[in-house]
Amino acid sequence: MTFELQHTDDASDARAGVITTDHGQILTPIFMPVGTEGAVKAVHFDELREEIKAQIILGNTYHLYLRPGLDVLRAAGGLHGFNGWERPILTDSGGFQVFSLTGIRKLSEEGCEFRSHIDGSKHFFTPENVMDTERIIGADIMMALDECPPGLSDYTYAKNSLAMTQRWLDRCIKRFDATEPLYGYRQSLFPIVQGCTYKDLRVEAAKFVADKGADGNAIGGLAVGEPTEVMYEMIEVVNAILPKDKPRYLMGVGTPQNILEAIERGVDMFDCVMPTRNGRNAMLFTYEGTMNMRNKKWETDFSPLDEGGCHIDRVTTKAYLHHLFKAKELLAMQIASIHNLAFYLRLVTDARQHIIAGDFTKWKASVIDQLGRRR
Ligand code: PRF
């Protein structure tokens, strides 16, 4: 994988670049739709390609390891072979999901023990077996195993947790370097910066990660309950240290406003369940603000969902989508998910174009307040 920086904004740390993988190019800044179980909820791959213009999607090691399982994935030739998505894929390592999804878990130096949320069976993740699993899934970008502590962890917990994440990173790198891709294309390993909301820990974590010389670097442990301003401050602290010539990925963030603020601070890659999850719950994101499609005010509004949006936005009226949600039609969730993902991709594509044109901060200032409005 390579990263070419094409343009850096004069007035901020925003950058436009291009990542090249063996499954194709990714123009940054980029948003990556979340396909936890090998599918983006309620959205077909044809729509991801043609309507949404997704360039890369996510998969989750935790979920895919439990189901369909490694034997099926290996036999299919990896996740690309299994689900038919021929563009790049990134897999999260599973640590975050183990902590957020499984009640019973035991964390030790060796790894984390957890019970399946599907059948209660016991499993153990280590940095080594997570690397092996991500090799089998065959993602273009594999994430290191980390611990994402709760946002408001005390200093001692955060410090000890970070130290373990760093030892786990060294074990991940060792295993990654000792193994080969299974399907004939290259894979990259991204380390993750942790350190909660403590500046000195974030600085130490960023230096530790920067020294590894990875193809790209991630910022984890944010958007987990801390105030938004603190999240922005941590991004600034970390990005001052992470290499400029490698992509930076802010994990699990966020609202359209969060994404623009992070782009301004030098972040290149994002993922979040918000466009799909909120979409299934009738909430649409637009440049003019958010809309609750269950609201009676849309009952006879026969204007398109979004004039400047994707094809489905232009041929679907607000009144019709309102009706679909009221009637609990599955099509409601499909349309809302497609709209929101297409909007997120449009947002980062617009950001990229304004970075290249040299007026990113001006453009951002002109759209940011409207984005948070309730329509
Ligand atoms: N670590 C991993 N995945 C993540 C996170 C993290 O800290 C977050 C935090 N926002 C989302 N997804 N491995």
Image: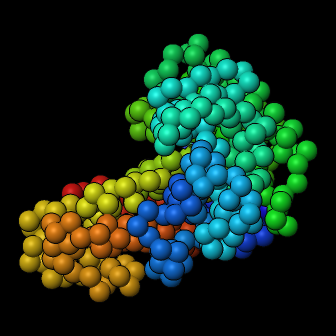
Could you tell me residue 210's position as x and y percent? 77, 40
Q: Which residue is drawn at 48% across and 60% down?
A: 361
Would residue 338 be found to the left or right of residue 351 on screen?
A: left
Asked if one can make out residue 151 in the rendered structure from this viewpoint, the answer is no
Q: Residue at x 16, y 69 (%)?
A: 327
Say which quarter of the image contains residue 38: bottom right
Give the quadrant of the N terminus: bottom right
Q: Which residue is drawn at 53% across and 54% down?
A: 36
Classify the position of ligand 1 by quadrant: top left, top right, bottom left or bottom right: top right
- Depicted 171 relative to depicted 215: above or below: above
Could you tell me residue 107's position as x and y percent? 62, 22
The extreme top residue here reads 156
Would residue 27 be found to the left or right of residue 135 on screen?
A: left
Say which quarter of the image contains residue 148: top right
Q: Tell which of 230 and 295 is nearer to you.
A: 295
Could you tell me residue 284's position as x and y percent? 29, 64
Q: Tell which of 11 and 161 is nearer to you.
A: 161
Could you tell me residue 104's position as x and y percent? 51, 26
